[in-house]
Image (cartoon, rainbow, N blue to C red):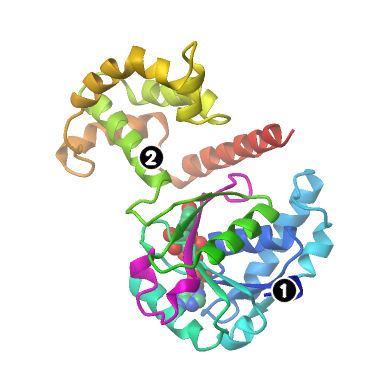
């Protein structure tokens, strides 16, 4: 496929993530066609995106080289799948996280696209071999898993189907890099991909420590936000270890691996997240931040403001 053929991207599903992908792709100068199976929904999504692009421009946080008006001019909305797919070289699916819905939309899409068109899913939790099981040519399929909100959190996990062609991974990696995201390649599929596996480990141990009466909800959150998280916003756990011993990673492990192994072997089974045992943890959290809409929305806004400022700091 020549560069001239790589101008149009179709986004399928115009909810939170579909709108975010559309904003990212137009920031890189691509024409983006948005499709949603709810009539009028993709047009409403463009109206919402317009509002956000203008606000971002005013806050000097607009991504890419183009103005908000120029980016907006690259967007179009469709209620018809075949028209939405016409001319696209890359399709990013963002429909509900339900296996049957995803399998069926990819099956439908394959009728309308050429054999070289890349089919990419935003799924958070479904492995590619399941999502694409009804697609005939699976060498062009992969998962591109974003992190919310993708405009400020740039990581994208690229996860291949067992049959995905290397060139498809390379093209997607180049596309994500071009629009300013930070793609990482998984060499094979695995439940939870990389991010959610690491996140699950952190959730499990934090939950256990609170449930076992070792630490409060408030303080375990501070362990991350004032401790580990300070480094992790800039360097990962591997580099952190490498820098934390005079002669690097091997030295670090010769000093600390015994401790790490002992602590790891004291981890208990998967905690009770939903039953009787969970209630005290949940109550403690809700005393700190009541779980009504008003309190949660205010904290979500605060989180997004912080993320925006952190994204700016990382850019500088
Ligand atoms: P959402 O509910 O906000 O939006 C889904 C959109 O898809 C809706 O507009 C709906 O009308 C449309 N839709 C449903 N079925 C369709 C179909 N057959 N054809 C066309 N459009 C259809 O969902 P979301 O939060 O944007 O999530 C979308 C995907 O992104 C999911 O797979 C989710 O797991 C993944 N994801 C979400 C997050 C997150 O934090 N929300 C993060 C990473 C990945």
The picture places residue 255, in percent across and down from the top left corner, at: 35, 12
The picture places residue 61, in percent across and down from the top left corner, at: 75, 45
Helix, strand or loop for disc 1: loop
Q: Earlier in the sequence, mark 2 or mark 1?
A: 1
Q: Is residue 236 magenta?
A: no
Look at discs 2 and 1 and give the one toward the viewer: 1
Give whichever of 305, 87 is nearer the camera. 87
Task: Specify whether residue 15 is in view.
Answer: no
Instruction: Please indicate whether residue 295 sits to the left or right of residue 27 in the image.
Output: left
| On-image quarter of the C terminus | top right
| On-image quarter of the N terminus | bottom right
The span shown in magenta is 128-156
Number of marks present in the image shown: 2
Q: Residue at x 65, y 52 (%)?
A: 177
Determine if the C-beta at disc 1 is less than 8 A from ligand 1. Answer: no
| Picture quadrant where residue 241 is located | top left
Instruction: Please indicate whether residue 128 sits to the left or right of residue 315 in the image.
Output: left
Q: Residue at x 22, y 36 (%)?
A: 279
| Picture quadrant where residue 190 is located | bottom left
- Identify the disc placed on residue 199: 2
Q: Is residue 145 magenta?
A: yes
The picture places residue 152, in percent across and down from the top left corner, at: 62, 45
Q: Residue at x 74, y 56 (%)?
A: 53
Q: Is residue 29 above or below residue 87?
A: above
Instruction: Please indicate whether residue 178 sits to the left or right of residue 156 in the image.
Output: right
Q: Is residue 231 above or below residue 188?
A: above
Separation of marks 2 and 1 at Cα, in angstroms: 39 Å
Label 2 crowd bin: few (<14), some (14–19), many (20+), radius 10 Å: few
Instruction: Please indicate whether residue 279 sits to the left or right of residue 229 in the image.
Output: left
The picture places residue 295, in percent across and down from the top left corner, at: 48, 39
């Amino acid at each position: 496929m020549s560069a001239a053929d790589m101008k149009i991207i179709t986004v399928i599903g115009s909810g939170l993530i579909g709108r975010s992908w559309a904003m990212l792709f137009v920031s890189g100068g691509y024409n983006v066609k948005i499709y949603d199976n709810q009539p009028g929904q993709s047009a409403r999504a463009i109206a919402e995106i317009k509002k956000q692009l203008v606000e971002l421009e005013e806050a000097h946080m607009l991504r890419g080289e183009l103005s908000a008006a120029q980016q907006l001019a690259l967007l179009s909305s469709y209620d018809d799948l075949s028209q939405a797919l016409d001319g696209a070289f890359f399709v990013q699916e963002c429909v509900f996280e339900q296996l049957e819905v995803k399998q069926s939309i990819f099956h439908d899409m394959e009728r309308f696209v050429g054999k070289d068109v890349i089919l990419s899913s935003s799924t958070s939790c479904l492995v590619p071999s399941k999502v694409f099981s009804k697609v005939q040519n699976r060498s062009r399929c992969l998962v591109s898993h974003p992190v919310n909100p993708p405009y400020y959190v740039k990581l994208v996990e690229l996860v291949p189907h067992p049959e995905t062609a290397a060139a498809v991974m390379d093209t997607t990696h180049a596309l994500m890099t071009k629009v300013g995201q930070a793609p990482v390649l998984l060499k094979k599929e695995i439940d939870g991909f990389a991010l959610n596996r690491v996140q699950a480990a952190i959730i499990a141990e934090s939950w256990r420590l609170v449930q076992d009466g070792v630490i409060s909800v408030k303080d375990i959150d501070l362990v991350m936000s004032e401790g580990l998280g300070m480094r992790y916003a800039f360097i990962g756990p591997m580099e952190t270890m490498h820098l934390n011993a005079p002669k690097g990673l091997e030295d670090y492990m010769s000093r600390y691996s015994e401790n790490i192994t002992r602590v790891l072997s004291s981890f208990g089974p998967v905690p009770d997240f939903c039953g009787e045992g969970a209630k005290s943890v949940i109550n403690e959290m809700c005393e700190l931040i009541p779980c009504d809409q008003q309190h949660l929305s205010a904290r979500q806004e605060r989180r997004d403001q912080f993320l925006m400022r952190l994204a700016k700091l990382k850019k500088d």
